[in-house]
């Protein structure tokens, strides 16, 4: 397809009209079939239509709608990473909580109290809800990757 322009003079003034046309061959002759009359266009509109037609003629091009591009199932990453940076680098809140081996020499914790506090704080900041739904929220985030913990140990009892 291509954008055809036809100029006409009327009362000393030149008018340019545009139409969409499809090229085809009939025997050995090249012909054009008018698909749609567009009427008068500004130079910007004509350039935009020509650019759109040029893009659609490449084999790598495909048409996508907004629903095709929208993420339905995604993980919270950047917001959690930003809060983690604030928690550790800016506010330095990790120093307030002891490490698991400092709290009890006989009992090993899979997740430290500081990590639990961090996760629950992130949860309240990003998606406030009940304490029990924090586990479900945790499973939709990249907290375990960002914090470097094993997410299987984060449950309703911790």
Image: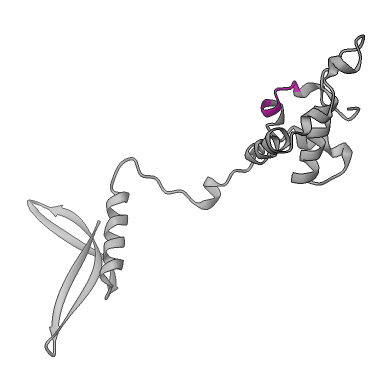
Quadrant in the picture for residue 34: bottom left
Q: Is residue 122 above or below residue 158?
A: below
x then y, percent, for residue 60: 34, 40
Q: In this view of the protein, which residue sits in the foreground, 47 or 111?
A: 111
Quadrant in the picture for residue 38: bottom left
Q: Is residue 46 above or below residue 117?
A: below
x then y, percent, for residue 3: 23, 62
Q: Is residue 65 above or below residue 13?
A: above
Q: Is residue 34 magenta?
A: no
Quadrant in the picture for residue 20: bottom left
Q: Is residue 76 above or below residue 34?
A: above
What segment carries the magenta color? 145-150
Residue at position x 85%, y 26% in the image: 113
Residue at position x 84%, y 23% in the image: 98
Residue 61 lies left or right of residue 69; in this view the side is left
Can see residue 102? yes
Residue 48 lies left or right of residue 136; in this view the side is left
Which residue, as the protein is rendered here, is positioned at the far top? 106
Question: Which quarter shows the N terminus?
Answer: bottom left
Question: Which quarter shows the C terminus?
Answer: top right
x then y, percent, for residue 125: 77, 45
């Amino acid at each position: 397809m291509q954008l055809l322009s036809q100029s006409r003079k009327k009362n000393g003034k030149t008018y340019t009209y545009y139409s969409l046309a499809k090229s085809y061959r009939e025997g050995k002759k090249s012909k054009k079939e008018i698909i749609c009359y567009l009427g008068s266009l500004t130079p910007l509109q004509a350039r935009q239509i020509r650019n759109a037609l040029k893009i659609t003629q490449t084999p790598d091009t495909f048409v996508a709608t907004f629903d095709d591009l929208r993420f339905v199932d995604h993980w919270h990453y950047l917001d959690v990473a930003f809060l983690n940076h604030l928690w550790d680098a800016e506010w330095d809140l990790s120093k307030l909580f002891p490490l698991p081996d400092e709290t009890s020499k006989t009992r090993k914790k899979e997740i430290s109290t500081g990590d639990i506090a961090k996760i629950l704080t992130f949860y309240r900041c990003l998606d406030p809800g009940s304490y029990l739904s924090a586990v479900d929220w945790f499973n939709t985030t990249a907290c375990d990757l960002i914090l470097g913990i094993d997410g299987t140990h984060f449950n309703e009892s911790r």
